[in-house]
Amino acid sequence: MTATLTLRVVPALTALLVCQAAAVAAAPEAKVVVYRGAALIDGTGAPPRNDRVIVTTGERITAVVPAAGFSVPAGAEVVELRGKFLVPGFVNTHVHLATLAEPAHARAYLRRELYSGVTALRDMAGDVRLLAELKREAEFNEIPSPDIYYVALMAGPEFFADPRTHDAARGRIAGEVPWMQALTPQTDLPLAVAAARGTGATALKLYADLPAPLVRAVTAEAHRQHLLVWAHATIFPAGPLDEVDAGIDVLSHAALLGYALESSIPPRYRHGALPLEVAPLLERPDARLTALFADMRRHGTILDATLYPYDSGAAAQRSKGLADRLADLAYRAGVAISTGTDDDGDLARPDSPLLEEFALLVQRAGVHLPDLVTAATRIGARAAGQERDMGTIEPGKLADFVVLDRDPLADVANLSSVALTVKRGIRYPHRDYRPVTEAEVKSGT
């Protein structure tokens, strides 16, 4: 560096540092809020604790203590919650915000999820050009939205005839974009995974038409590059046991676990296909399912059960309770279950279909209410790879929680009694929520 260049650079650098220091000094001090008096169900599995105080500073929880003897810090705001129940924010572990990228519709959906108590969600494949924008807006609280963790999808070349992939890659070629890649044994996996990681994805989603050796190879490479791997519970021809042994972190759709009982798995994916012929086998113990569930426990594999899409509309008749029964067996075997909806984004509903998923897990799959709260919170956070920051009410975690009017351990319906959602320390009283209709979304009003 010449003397002249040094003389020019040093003053400029000094001025920049002075400006940065001034900006830090001028930053407002994080606000302290005291939430006092609620019964706390903290998501750790501990029994409920009455009359608790949760202190937040900015977007983080800084203290969780008994109300008795607690002194409110000078200048803190107090939110009285006596008679209420406080749980961690819900995690919806299966949504599709951007199959066809429609920003207004996605933002209306996200707003409804947040006011229903959902503070984080996993998007399970869509156009990441929109998802990245929504993720940033949500993280900085520019829109009322849960935090978003999304995937880059990988599948065999045959899958990309599916018109949904064309919608999600609109303007580009499905199978040839970083967020929707076709895999073959000849694919340069380190490069493909790096391209997926560059989209800002939290995980890969392995969808369909991949053999077991390729599933193992891409999962290992994704983990090497610090990406999670999420997948359908059968990928065709790779089956559930292949996926668990490959180290996949989360399997979606309990109904697809039924392929573990098939003598052979179809070589190609077919949308909506279910292993209905195995239904009679579910009425008695089966060593193949016992082995699968033991393997899932050993690997820590989470089941994103998604009963809602299989128990509603025409799918209910087609599935004949298959998803319910398999989720029940997995739960009783000790498999960790998360709560996802895989819904169609219908804005006619006044609240999230996640509340219906809760009821189905309790009423159809036999999940006990304390375990349901854990599934909707701590297990959901782990499924999203965010257990360090969310999922339980503990000091250091994000201030993400839900205040309920009624006891969620008395009746699953009480999880819908949302009075207040707090996300990253910002309060969203349910009384302020006004549903956005499809007509308003289309008209832009």
Image: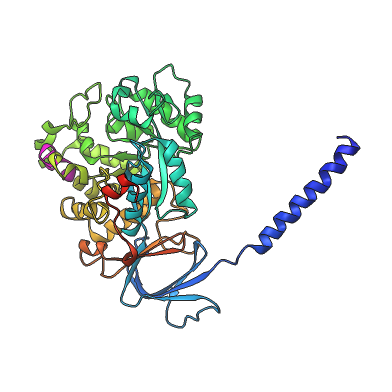
Q: Quadrant of residue 119?
A: bottom left
Position of the N terminus, as image quadrant, is top right
Is residue 433 rendered to the left or right of residue 78? left
Give the number of callouts: 0
Is residue 285 rendered to the left or right of residue 180? left
Residue 342 in the image: above or below residue 33: above
Is residue 438 on the magenta stretch? no
Q: At 33% from the left edge and 54% from the top edge, which residue is drawn? A: 113
Q: In terms of depth relative to the viewer, which is nearer, 327 or 397? A: 397
- Residue at the bottom extreme of this rendering: 69
Q: At 30% from the left edge and 60% from the top edge, which residue is drawn? A: 434
Residue 39 in the image: above or below residue 176: below
Residue 167 location in percent, x, y?
A: 33, 30
Residue 63 location in percent, x, y?
A: 49, 69
Residue 240 in the image: above or below residue 37: above
Residue 204 location in percent, x, y?
A: 41, 34
Q: Quadrant of residue 6?
A: top right
Q: Quadrant of residue 230?
A: top left
- Residue numbers of the magenta segment: 316-325
- Residue at the right extreme of this rendering: 3
> Can residue 284 be seen in this snapshot?
no
Q: In terms of depth relative to the viewer, which is nearer, 429 or 407? A: 429
Is residue 342 rendered to the left or right of residue 151? left
> Can residue 192 be seen in this snapshot?
yes
